[in-house]
Amino acid sequence: MNMPQIRLQSTQAKIEITTTPGQMSIQQPTADLDLQQPPAEMTINRTPSVLNIDQSQARADLDLKSIFVRTREIAQKGYQDWVKGLARTAEEGNELMKIENHGKAIPKIAKQNSEPPMYDVNIGFIPSIGSVKLKYDPGNVEIQWNIKKPINNTKINKPIMDYNPGSVQVGIKQYQDLKIDFDNLKFVGINFELEI
């Protein structure tokens, strides 16, 4: 006896995917550089330094006087000597006027006029200490800067972009299929009959 059989044969569906990759192209043009730097301005105001050396006192100590100083000193000394001489003459005249008082005015006056004067002797430094006078003015320096900012006219160029988008195509490569075979079985109307 043959047993009825139903044979099923199926084929699976297959999907086909086709991709096209996207492409991107980027170009970056260089920037147009326009940069200017005006030079800075510097102003210097300077008062020169001054050194004054006064050695007139030292030269006078060494008896190296100018003609003007020497003339002034001689005139002053002459005036003082004249005043002293005038006073001495007046005093001698008064003493001679009183000669009747039995004074020894003439020998006394002769002795005073014949003796050399007494000089003071002392140790001294030539030239004297501090006779050279120094005066120094260091001056002044003022520096002023006028700094100028750079002028920047640089132009930035945007990048050039070219983009081709990719694509994905999905399709069916093979459709599903189902085959049904009956063996030892017969379809009659709405029922099945078994073949013996």
Image: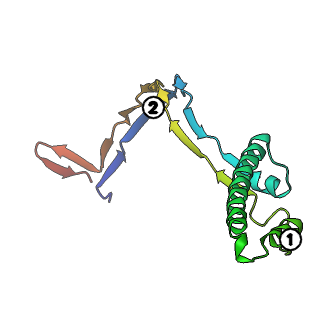
Q: Is residue 160 left or right of residue 131?
A: left
Pointer 2 local density, CA inside 10 Å: few below 14, some 14–19, many at least 20: few
Viewer-proximal residue, 36 or 41?
41
* Location of residue 147 in the rendering, given as x and y in whole percent from the top left corner: 50, 35
In the rendered image, the residue lying farthest to the front is: 100
In the rendered image, the residue lying farthest to the left is: 190
Q: Amino acid at mark 1?
A: Lys
Measure the C-alpha gap from mark 1 to mark 2: 142 Å
Viewer-proximal residue, 96 or 11?
96
Quarter-of-image position of residue 47? top right
Does residue 29 appear in the picture of this structure? Answer: no
Q: Is residue 104 left or right of residue 192?
A: right
* Location of residue 145 in the rendering, given as x and y in whole percent from the top left corner: 52, 38
Does residue 194 appear in the picture of this structure? Answer: yes
In the rendered image, the residue lying farthest to the bottom is: 102
Viewer-proximal residue, 126 or 54?
126
